């Protein structure tokens, strides 16, 4: 009986020790996960504030969401208008004008994009070389902010110019094709006269 009790105590102590070790391990693992940064996969970036896709888009003069204020409020962008020129029944003069707007937008955006990449690279090097100062930081951020503002202007302005060339029906069709608005004939807003609404929106 005494031997069984001793074996029981030994096994119990072993199990207890395993449980304590496992608890300690899991606690340490949880603590590591708790404090782990979401930026760990960005440490190897050449420019920490820009992803490879960001650099590609800036180099190509792509939109990068700079024109959302226009696009999502009913101001068509030149690129997508040209992509759907058949669906929008664009006239030759409209196509010619919008192509010029698009080409000018891309040209200016590429130049500003390259400038932004250079500015972000310079800021990154200040931090990586431990040469950053408050004055250098203030100057760098002012320059970066100015270029970003220029990029937004370039893209937003192109949307305004494009909208001025299109008819109301083309703008309406654009927004429907882009998925920004449903069929106005299916739902008449409260307070509107049904017949007038149907007539205004070209409903049969």
Image (spheres, rainbow, N blue to C red):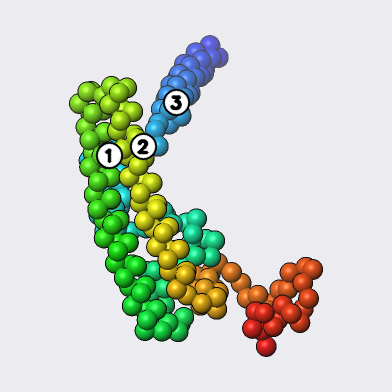
Q: Which mark is residue 39?
A: 2
Residue name at image x 67 percent, y 79 percent: 200
- Number of marks drawn: 3
Q: How crowded is mark 1: few (under 14 residues within 10 Å), some or many (20 or more)?
A: some
Does 204 sit left or right of 39 as displayed?
right
Residue name at image x 36 percent, y 40 percent: 145
Q: How crowded is mark 3: few (under 14 residues within 10 Å), some or many (20 or more)?
A: few
Q: Which mark is residue 31?
A: 3
Give the quadrant of residue 186.
bottom right
The earlier-in-sequence mark between 3 and 1 is 3
Foreground mark, 2 or 3, reads 2
The earlier-in-sequence mark between 2 and 1 is 2
Residue 37 in the image, given as x and y percentages of width and height: 39, 33
Residue topped by disc 1: 120
Query: Residue furthest toward the top?
Result: 2
Give the quadrant of residue 42.
top left
Foreground mark, 2 or 1, reads 1
Q: Which of 41 and 8 is in front in this view?
A: 41
The earlier-in-sequence mark between 2 and 3 is 3
Circles 2 and 3: CB atoms closer than 8 Å: no
Q: Which of 140 and 188 is in front in this view?
A: 140
Q: Residue 96 carries which label?
A: none
Residue 46 in the image, given as x and y percentages of width and height: 22, 40
Residue 53 in the image, given as x and y percentages of width and height: 30, 52
């Amino acid at each position: 009986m005494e031997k069984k009790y001793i074996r029981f105590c030994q096994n119990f102590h072993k199990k207890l020790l395993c449980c304590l070790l496992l608890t300690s391990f899991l606690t340490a693992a949880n603590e590591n996960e708790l404090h782990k940064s979401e930026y760990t996969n960005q440490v190897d970036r050449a420019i920490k504030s820009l992803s490879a896709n960001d650099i590609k888009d800036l180099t190509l003069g792509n939109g990068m969401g700079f024109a959302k204020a226009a696009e999502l409020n009913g101001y068509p962008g030149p690129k997508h208008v040209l992509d759907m020129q058949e669906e929008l029944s664009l006239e030759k003069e409209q196509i010619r004008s919008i192509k010029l707007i698009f080409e000018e937008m891309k040209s200016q955006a590429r130049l500003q994009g390259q400038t932004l990449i250079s500015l972000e690279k310079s800021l990154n090097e200040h931090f990586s070389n431990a040469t950053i100062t408050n004055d250098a930081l203030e100057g760098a951020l002012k320059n970066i902010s100015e270029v970003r503002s220029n990029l937004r202007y370039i893209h937003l302005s192109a949307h305004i110019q494009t909208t001025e060339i299109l008819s109301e029906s083309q703008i309406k069709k654009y927004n429907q094709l882009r998925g920004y608005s449903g069929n106005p004939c299916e739902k008449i807003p409260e307070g509107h006269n049904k017949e007038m609404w149907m007539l205004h929106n070209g409903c049969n």
